[in-house]
Amino acid sequence: PWARVVRHPTNLGLGAALRTGFRYAESPIVCTVDSDCTYPPERLPELVALLADGAEIATAWAWHPGNEPADADQDPDALGRAVSGLYQRLVGQDIHAFTCLFRAYRRDALVRIPFRSDGFASVAEIMLRALLAGYRVRELPMRLGARRFGESKLKIGDAIVAHASLLMLAATLVATRRLRALVPGVPVTH
């Protein structure tokens, strides 16, 4: 079938939904789209084209340095931009879009990225783990549009706690990898 609807009996969080969707996906390319359509789904082929050029993950980002600035009154993702900056510094990669869900993945790479977060931080965790594993990531400048559907379910307090925990995990993973480079035999934790 072209599409399959998979449901959880209760809301288990975005990360759980992504894990379930990824498990059921069978095509060589898997795309994720924000349900409010703030990024235009008709631009998915542009992300897929980046995979054809060798990326394993392609992601949109509204505040990419090559993009026109978002309107001052259109900053629904200030937290995402802030934590993305912290993640970027931590992993030392020139990637800016850690929290954007509008992505395309090569399925063969996606199935090798373990992630544990169940909430909104799962999107950042997938990107962090992919970068730390050496995956090629490409970004596509894309203006964030107005919400077309629904309301945000993000609870700021929960998101801050989740990202703080994820930053600590990422710092541990980065430190372990650096130590492993200096001292052979140190196990890498996931």
Image (spheres, rainbow, N blue to C red):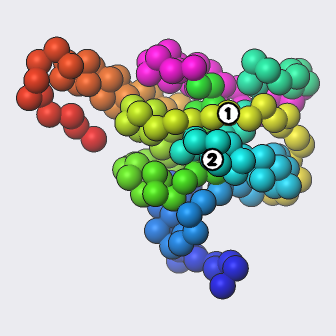
Residue placed farthest to the front in the image? 53
Three-letter amino acid code of the residue under disc 1: Glu
Disc 2 secondary structure class: helix
Q: What residue range appears in magenta?
A: 73-94
Q: Which residue is mark 1?
A: 139
In space, the residues marked 1 and 2 are separated at their CA atoms by 11 Å
Q: Is residue 188 magenta?
A: no
Q: In the picture shown, does residue 123 fall above or below 150? A: above
**Dot 1 alpha-carbon crowd within 10 angstroms: few under 14, some 14 to 19, many 20 or more:** many
Q: Please state, as top left, top right, bottom left or bottom right, where the N terminus lies in the image.
A: bottom right
Element on which disc 1 rests: strand
Give the crowd class for mark 2: few <14, some 14-19, many >=20 residues within 10 Å.
Answer: many
Residue at image position (54%, 54%) is 106
Specify the amino acid type for callout 2: Leu
Taking depth in this image into account, of 91 and 80 the one nearest to the observer is 91
The answer to which of 160 and 38 lies nearer the viewer is: 38
Q: Quadrant of residue 154?
A: top right
Residue at 62% x, 21% y is: 82
Tell me where residue 190 appears, x and y as whole percent: 27, 41
Please give the count of numbered marks on the rendered protein.
2
Q: Is residue 190 visible?
A: yes
Q: Point out residue 123 in the picture as x, y percentages from the top left corner.
A: 55, 44
Q: Position of residue 51 (x, y in %)?
A: 63, 47
- Tell me which label, 1 or 2, sits earlier in the chain: 2
Q: Main secondary structure of the magenta part?
A: helix
Horizontally, residue 21 falls left or right of residue 34, namely: left
Please, which residue is most extreme toward the left here?
A: 185
Identified at 70% across, 51% down, the residue is 48
Q: Which mark is residue 51?
A: 2
